[in-house]
Amino acid sequence: MLGALGLELGTSEIVMIAFAILPLLVLVPFAIIDSIRSSRLTVVQKIAWIVFIIIAPYLGAIVYLLWGRKQKMV
């Protein structure tokens, strides 16, 4: 299929693309769902996090998981 488009991809290129896309397919939905389900965040904070995650997927998801998801230590 990609060969018909003039793209000849070898195994190493496919692996690199997979390593770039798979985290995006896992982290972004997880961060969005987690922010929606968070009882600690206000509605405005949830919307802000979701917009940030959508605009800058890798950066937004990582920043949310590091700082936006802080939970109270018991």
Image: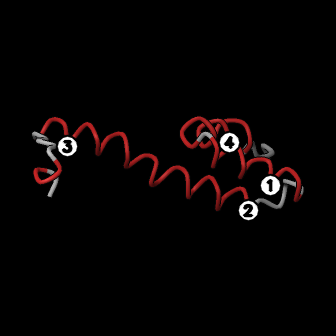
The image shows residue 48 at horizontal and vertical percentages of: 80, 48
Say which amino acid is labelled 2.
Ile
Q: Which residue is mark 4?
A: 64
- Mark 2 secondary-structure assignment: helix
Q: Nearer the viewer, mark 3 or mark 2?
A: 3
Look at the numbered discs 4 and 1 and tell me whether their residues touch, using CB distance below 8 Å: no
Tell whether 9 sits left or right of 36.
left
Q: Nearer the viewer, residue 62 or 69?
A: 62
Q: Nearer the viewer, residue 59 or 8?
A: 8
Say which amino acid is labelled 3.
Ile
The number of discs equals 4
- Mark 3 secondary-structure assignment: helix
Tell whether 5 sits left or right of 40.
left
> In the figure, residue 17 lies in which quadrant?
top left
Separation (CA) of disc 3 from disc 2: 33 Å
Q: Which residue is mark 2?
A: 36
Separation (CA) of disc 4 from disc 1: 11 Å
**From what the image shows, is residue 52 above or below residue 30?**
above
Separation (CA) of disc 1 from disc 2: 6 Å
Which badge, 4 or 3, is on the more N-terminal residue?
Answer: 3
**From what the image shows, is residue 28 above or below residue 37?**
above
Tell whether 31 sits left or right of 17.
right
> In the figure, residue 72 lies in which quadrant?
top right
Q: Nearer the viewer, mark 4 or mark 3?
A: 3
Say which amino acid is labelled 4.
Tyr
Look at the numbered discs 3 and 2 and tell me whether their residues touch, using CB distance below 8 Å: no
